[in-house]
Amino acid sequence: LHLLFGLAFGTTAAIVLGALRQRMDAMAALLVSVLGLSCAATSLLARPHLLALPLLAFWTAKLVQARTANRAPSLWLAIVMLLWANLHGSFAFGLALAAALGAEAVIESPDRPGAARQWSVFLGAGLIAALLTPRGVEGLLFPLRLLAMPGIATIGEWAPSDVAHLSPLLLALLVTIFVLAMGKVQLPKIRALLVLALLYLALAHARHQMLFGVAAPLLAAPALGRAWPARTFAANPWLARGVAAFLVLLLIGRILWPATRGEDRVSPVAALAHVPRDLRGRPVLNAYDYGGYLIFQGVKVFVDGRTDMYSADFLKNYDRLQAGDDAAVTATLSRYHIAWTIFPAGSPTAVALDRLPGWHRLYGDANASVHVKD
């Protein structure tokens, strides 16, 4: 899993840097890539969206390349959409981006009918490819229905991004504003609107920060290239050697000090370790954020991060559980024959369970609490 998802993000980084490097000075391309890709830091998880990220980067790079050459993308690019649509619901963004750049092509082309015809053929091919999934039309409509789900606003990754504290997104935003204020980079109007739309998505939903970090630099690449024209590494051999040495040091450092998963807000490691094996196999009521870790440890969870798997009524009831509603907690424990629970320490649900007759706390630490039925 580590290798697979590490390669997925590494491939994404290679595509982004390669596309920028074709148009920009090496150091500028490296800085823009790092700044953009850092926005995906909170989404570096072993989940399907990361497998789709290289396709997002490749798709966007090829669309921009076609626009720069004043032509429609190759129909062979529809194969990317076929794979993307069968991997993750973010393929809908790819179709929307192609439609937006197609509109840009028509507006800016001296031969508008010709541009409209070429891009319509490409969009048609992409749409057909997106329909070739086990769900067909339902799969195409799924992303729209997901956004319309009433319970989605209460989920952390769909919440607005935090700009009150320093983060990769905030740093990228401040640097972008500074560069644009200096007047050195001038984006065409339609391209600027696309970048702003991506920024809005990133601010409105934390999970869309990675869309902004990957797609925005690629969309802005032609304008960035005009500000910092491409040069070869041979023109600055010390830069090439410095970058190579830095990468070697990073690799050595990671080998000597490997990243290990420990106790955090989504991983109740110690709490789960204190749950007896026979109890783990019985029905559990768990915190939404713990779902992924519990599944990985073989626990059949009550709820997890696949929001679309649960009905609106189920999620509404879960919101009441998270708020510590005594009636909702009692009814849910009874209805689903819950034998044990695991929630963040001090959460309203954990507090409600502390005072609930017939239940007691089996284990608690600064991160999580486990309650069991008497």
Image (spheres, helix red, strand yellow):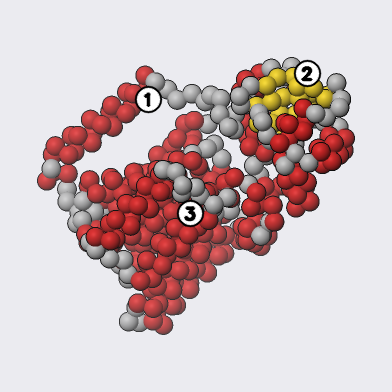
User: Which amino acid does the dot numbered 1 rest on?
Assistant: Arg
Residue 254, which numbered label?
A: 1
- Quadrant in which the C terminus is drawn: top right
Q: Is residue 107 left or right of residue 1?
A: left
- Relative depth, front residue between 260 and 72: 260
Residue 77 percent across, percent down from the top left? 44, 59
> Looking at the image, do the residues carrying marks 3 and 1 touch, with CB atoms under 8 Å apart?
no
Name the residue at 62% across, 30% down: 293
Name the residue at 38% across, 73% down: 105
Q: Is residue 168 left or right of residue 341?
A: left
Tag 3's secondary structure?
Answer: helix
Name the residue at 33% across, 57% down: 177
What residue is pinned by disc 2? 278
Residue 72 in view, yes or no = no
**Number of on-image labels:** 3
Residue 23 percent across, percent down from the top left? 25, 56
Upstream in the sequence, badge 3 or badge 1?
3
